[in-house]
Image (cartoon, helix red, strand yellow):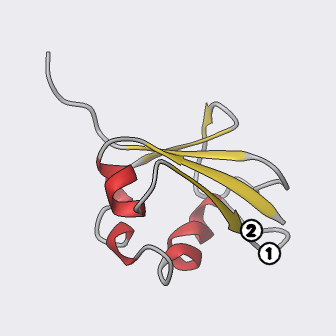
């Protein structure tokens, strides 16, 4: 199944794009994404723990199952004031 990755700021730099379609196995979870993306975007490996992950606009835990066509947003930490 396919999911759409959307990345912002440092997450986009690590992914190499602000958006990307990704093929994942049925039953894949948010927690599976780092391993699934390791070959395509190795720079994400060192950054992954810093990101919040949202699925279809809602913050998602690692055990959230992904659905075909869902949007997964990689949200880096925000700083400033």
User: Where residue 65 appears, x then y in whole percent?
Assistant: 76, 57
Residue at x 53%, y 74% (from the top left corner): 37
Q: Name the quarter where the N terminus is drawn.
A: bottom right
Residue at x 83%, y 53% (from the top left corner): 67
Is the residue 44 above or below the residue 51 in the image?
Answer: below
Is the residue 28 above or below the residue 73 in the image?
Answer: below
Give the residue pinned by disc 2. 28
- Residue 41 sits in which quadrant? bottom left
- Residue 36 sits in which quadrant? bottom right
Left or right: 53 with respect to 47? right
The secondary element bearing badge 2 is classed as loop
- Residue 45 sits in which quadrant? bottom left
Mark in the foreground, 2 or 1: 1
Left or right: 52 with respect to 36? left
Q: CA distance from mark 2 to mark 1?
A: 6 Å
Between 50 and 41, the one lying in front of the other is: 41
Residue at x 58%, y 67% (from the top left corner): 33
Residue at x 26%, y 32% (from the top left corner): 78
Between 44 and 30, the one lying in front of the other is: 44
Left or right: 44 with respect to 58? left
User: Where residue 6 appears, x then y in whole percent?
Assistant: 55, 46
Please state the total of marks drawn on the protein image.
2
Left or right: 24 with respect to 16? right
Q: Are marks 2 and 1 in contact (CB under 8 Å)?
A: yes
The secondary element bearing badge 1 is classed as loop
Give the residue pinned by disc 1. 25
Name of the residue lying farthest toward the left: 81
User: Where residue 20 appears, x then y in whole percent?
Assistant: 59, 57
Name of the residue lying farthest toward the bottom: 39
Name of the residue lying farthest toward the top: 81
């Amino acid at each position: 199944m396919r999911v759409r990755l959307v990345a912002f700021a440092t997450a986009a730099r690590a992914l190499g794009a602000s958006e990307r379609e990704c093929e994942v196995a049925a039953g894949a979870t948010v927690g599976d994404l780092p391993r699934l993306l390791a070959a395509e975007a190795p720079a994400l490996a060192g950054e992954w723990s810093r990101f919040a992950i949202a699925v279809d606009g809602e913050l998602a835990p690692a055990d959230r199952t992904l659905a075909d066509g869902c949007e997964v947003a990689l949200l880096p930490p925000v700083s400033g004031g």
